Image (cartoon, rainbow, N blue to C red):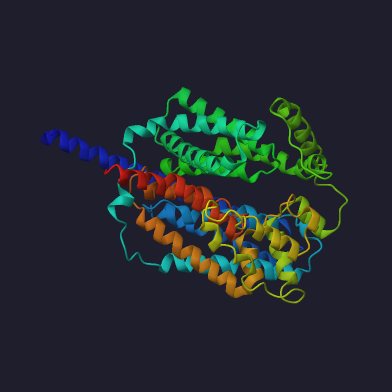
Amino acid sequence: MSPRDSSTAAVNDHSEELASRVASYRLYRFGAGLLTAAIFAIWLAHPERDVTQIALGSAMLVLAVLPALMWAKHMRLWFPVFEIFMLTGVAFYVLPFTGSQSDLVGFDPAVLNKSAFTVVAFQIAAIFAFNTTRMRFRPSRSWTRPLLPESAMKLSAIGIWLNTAYIGISQFTVLIPYELAAPLRAVFFGCGTISVFIQCRYWGQQRLSGYARLGLIANIFAQSAMLASQLYLINVISILGLSFIAYTTTSRKIPLLAIAISIPFLGLLHSGKSEMRKIYWGGDSKRAPELTDLYSFYQEWFALGISGHGENSSENDTDASLIQRASLFQIIAVTVDRVPDKLPFLSGESYKDVPALFVPRYFWPGKPTALEANVRLSLYFGLVAEYSADSVSIAFGMLAEAYANFGFIGILGLGALMGTLFKRVCVAAEGVDLLSPLGIFVILLTAWSLQVEMVAATWLSSLFQATVVMVLGPMFGLRLIGR
């Protein structure tokens, strides 16, 4: 390379770095402005509420957003997995507590305040652990070298199409044997997650053609429509969230148009979800629409969402409301209200099956399933009848589970553990190739950071399965061929 070429490359690199810093600071200012406006809204929207309650809601919001703001302001080089994980608290904890509280009517204000303080304690513990943890090791080359060449990223669009096809086949046909369902789900979900992430990063880098963008949008729409037909919205939120995250962290810009389109649709679906569950989950077993029925299925769902029928139910019983709409803050309020005054601490009961989940079912055919901890918690708090425990799912989340087991000690311990683990992974993966084992694990961890409705056993086992298929398996394969 000639001196002139070297000088030109250096100027280009400096220009790109400067542009990135400007975009990052703009993202910080935009986020700080939204946070300020949201805090004012919290204080002005419900002046009749207790000042303590308003202050706790504001504290929850600040602590949920603060890590992401600092990441943008200081232009951190690690991928913001922890920051994304903390941001989920806005949707699952802050909004239910600071909003209309229509689903919290049956709780004493002291219980609500204690529940909010529980969330704040977790946030403080997690942020403190993240900021005080120092990286003391560097990953070996086997974790940082690419599993595939850079050119393989261009094939990521194929991975998205394959995952879309798999979702359609698995949900609307009986072609996949039961024995292969779990491993194939792990393979295709992992492949699809990584492919969506790569394609959206390409979009953020302005490296995606117009046709490729249309294909990406079409696949995300098709996957969302098929997954939501099971009447669970968390998978749809995860796909959209991962897409927005991949784009934003690369371009340092928020896809406002895409978010503005997505939120009203998700709001309508959420509004009509409880009534749709009554229709399709009533009786002795669940039923799901066929592929050819999806159009009429969504017509019915949107009509219920627009009418607000699902939200205006005359149901006053708190527990019944929880079954219909599993808000994580509601679950924490139930847990704080009943433990330990009415029910004793579980003292690790819901965690006892976690070690068994890492044993392959081939060696232990009768091992516990990852959902048993969730079922055990639902029955313990009387949120579901025993005959319907396997068919009705209550989203608990790890915070409520930690409090149910060990109280505030469990909350602080969970926060410290999550903050420490996220920091070690983020720093270790800083600057590594996206297609390296560590890079792929960070993508998977990003997707799982959105799965906050899971209990620890489900979260760990599903992440472990995806890691085995997408990270450890390819690493072992490369060692066998001597690469």
Q: Nearer the viewer, residue 272 or 287?
A: 287
Q: Position of residue 481 (x, y in %)?
A: 29, 42
- Specify the farthest residue to the left: 2
Q: Position of residue 39 (x, y in %)?
A: 61, 58
Residue 65 visible, this angle: no
Q: Is residue 229 left or right of residue 147?
A: right
Q: Is residue 70 left or right of residue 308?
A: left
Residue that appears at 80% across and 61% down: 105
Q: Position of residue 221 (x, y in %)?
A: 59, 31
Q: Is residue 315 left or right of residue 376?
A: right
Residue that appears at 25% across and 37% down: 12
Q: Nearer the viewer, residue 439 or 125?
A: 439
Quarter occupied by residue 271: top right
User: Count of labels shown?
Assistant: 0
**Placement of 433 over or under 382, stated as above or below:** above
Which quadrant, please, contains the C terminus? Answer: top left
Q: Nearer the viewer, residue 272 or 253?
A: 272
Which quadrant, please, contains the N terminus? Answer: top left
Q: Position of residue 366 (x, y in %)?
A: 61, 56
Residue 419 visible, this angle: yes
